[in-house]
Image: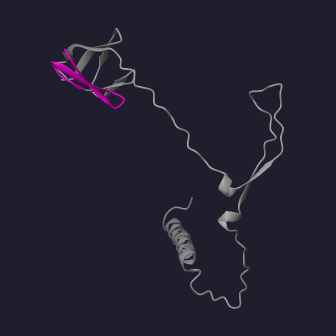
Amino acid sequence: MLKGKNGLIIAVVLNIAVWSFFAYRFYIAFHEGEDLEIENVRVPVVKTLNADTIEYKLSLNYDDPFLKKESHKSKAINLPREQVKLVPKKVEKEPVKMPDIKYLGLVKNSSSGIATAIISVNGQSKIVKANESIEGIVIKSFDRNELVAFVGKVKLVVKK
């Protein structure tokens, strides 16, 4: 490459040229439409449909995936918009099954200060930390005597 004074001059000139190009493109992008004047322009009129005139066409000529051998071929049905009603599906919530939780104790590391709880969930012993989730149970906090946990939105306080 060029070294010394000649290389520096060429680099400066190229740098100025590149930055000038970017500045020019930036200026054109934001100031291009200011000086435009449009005269005698004819705008086509688009005919719009009223919402009441929309019709839905259901095409029911597909093979039913559950009836492998029988095919469900029928004619298309035209329904006006007033007859099409969307009914939200009602979802029945199952009651939350409460697990059998027993608080067995607290283990605290004296050097680091990290505490863990020993709990029994449905007969299986687990070691958990605060704000940890096990089998859908969120352990919020615990101390020497009690454990606070949430099963879904239900708050459980388990004594030792």
Residue projecting furthest to the top = 123
Q: Quadrant of the C terminus?
A: top left
Q: Is residue 100 left or right of residue 39?
A: left
Q: Which region is colored magenta? A: 141-160
Viewer-proximal residue, 68 or 86?
Answer: 86
Compared to residue 28, the image places residue 50 above or below, namely: above
Residue 82 placement (x, y as % from top left): 66, 56
Of residues 41 and 82, which is closer to you in this image?
82
Q: In this view of the protein, which residue sits in the foreground, 94 or 150?
A: 94
| Closer-to-camera residue (87/30) | 87
Horizontal side, residue 109 vs residue 2: left or right? left
By secondary structure, the bulk of the magenta-drawn segment is best described as strand
Residue at the front extreme of this rendering: 83
Q: Position of residue 25 (x, y in %)?
A: 57, 73
Examine the structure image and report whether residue 148 is included in the region drawn in magenta. yes
Q: Residue at x 83, y 31 (%)?
A: 71
Question: Eyeballing the image, is 4 above or below 25?
Answer: above
Taking the spot 49% from the left edge, 67% from the top edge, the residue there is 8
Q: Is residue 118 magenta?
A: no
Splitting the image into 4 quarters, where does residue 124 fall?
Answer: top left
- Its colouring scheme is one colour
Q: Quadrant of the N terminus?
A: bottom right
Image x and y of residue 47, in percent: 73, 74
Marker count (numbered) = 0
Q: Residue sitting at 66 percent across and 51 percent down?
A: 84
Left or right: 122 as drawn, with respect to 86: left
Estimate the x, y position of residue 103 in percent, counting from the top left: 24, 15
Most extreme residue toward the bottom is: 39
